[in-house]
Image (cartoon, helix red, strand yellow):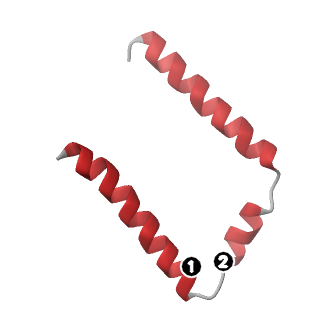
Amino acid sequence: MDLLLALGIPMLVLGLAYLLINNASGFPVWLERLTNRSGAIWTYGVIIIAVISIVRYASGN
């Protein structure tokens, strides 16, 4: 049951977001600005999230 919720809820949210964007005939302005930013920001964000996860795992929490 937990696996179903863990996979089902994000898929439902992404599906609804896709339908809203698709029905609105394109991306909203804020989303276009977000996608035009440098890929380095996203790369560093993923690295930071991974490092924080490793530190939390190593600390035992």
- Which residue is denoted by mark 2 in the rendering? 27
- Which residue is denoted by mark 1 in the rendering? 21
The residue type indicated by label 1 comes to Ile
- Mark sitting on residue 12: none
Please report the residue visible at 67 percent of the width from the left and 39 percent of the height from the top: 45
* Of the pair 59 and 5, the residue shown nearer to us: 5
Please report the residue visible at 39 percent of the width from the left and 12 percent of the height from the top: 60
Residue with the most extreme top position: 59
Left or right of 27? Residue 61 is left
Left or right of 56? Residue 3 is left
Q: Is residue 17 above or below residue 51?
A: below
* Labels 2 and 1: the sequence-earlier one: 1
Q: Where residue 44 sits: x, y (%)?
A: 73, 36
Are there few (<14), some (14-19), or many (20+) residues within 10 Å of tag 1? few
Q: Which quarter of the picture shows residue 26?
A: bottom right
User: Circles 2 and 1: CB distance less than 8 Å?
Assistant: yes
The residue type indicated by label 2 comes to Phe
Local SS, label 1? helix
Q: Is residue 25 above or below residue 2?
A: below
Please report the residue visible at 63 percent of the width from the left and 88 percent of the height from the top: 25
Q: Where residue 5 sits: x, y (%)?
A: 26, 52
Please report the residue visible at 51 percent of the width from the left and 25 percent of the height from the top: 53
Q: Where residue 4 sits: x, y (%)?
A: 24, 51
